[in-house]
Amino acid sequence: MAYLADTNIIVRRVLPADPLHGVVSAALLALDRQGEIVYLTPQNLIEFQALATRPLSANGLGLSPAQASAEARRIEAVYPLLPDVSAVYPLWRNLVDTFAVVGRQVYDARLVAVMQAHGVTNLLTLDAGDFRRFVGVVSVVDPKNV
């Protein structure tokens, strides 16, 4: 089974001082040992860049653009990307319409659409509630349960 990592997973993976770093790292290691592939999407890396370069005072990481890009390249070297393909938009549009997705949740719907386009059914996330509406479309997995 393949997994898509939510952006919150890769953020915690690169923050050793974060309280959830150990849980996330252990889950990713366990999946690797099980021979599971954990994917990212370009959207994950775009979201990471935005968060990483946002000031600490605005709940960001406070990295310079160069530092954030270097960290993103390290992430890219470890986790394969599911590419954006033309099938993503119609799948996303269907999810948004079917589940009445609003606000920031449209980004979560896009991750699910990318998963659908590539046949990935498992989502590794710390925010299961954000994806609750997509039960039956994807399996949401908390890193503590890996």
Image: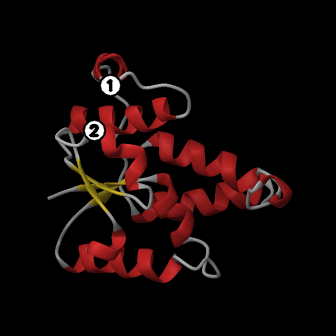
| Residue type (three-letter) at the residue carrying disc 1 | Phe
Q: Give the crowd class for mark 1: few <14, some 14-19, many >=20 residues within 10 Å.
A: few
| Residue type (three-letter) at the residue carrying disc 2 | Phe
Name the residue: 44% across, 56% down: 127
Name the residue: 52% across, 76% down: 20
One can see residue 40 in this view: no
Q: Which residue is mark 1?
A: 99
- Expressed as whole percent of the image width and height from the top left, the position of residue 33 reads 22, 80
The N terminus - image quarter: bottom left
Q: Disc number at residue 117?
A: none
- Expressed as whole percent of the image width and height from the top left, the position of residue 10 reads 50, 62
- Expressed as whole percent of the image width and height from the top left, the position of residue 40 reads 39, 51
Mark 2 falls on what kind of element? helix
Q: Nearer the viewer, residue 19 or 77?
A: 19
Q: Which residue is mark 2?
A: 134
The answer to whether residue 71 is left or right of residue 118 is right
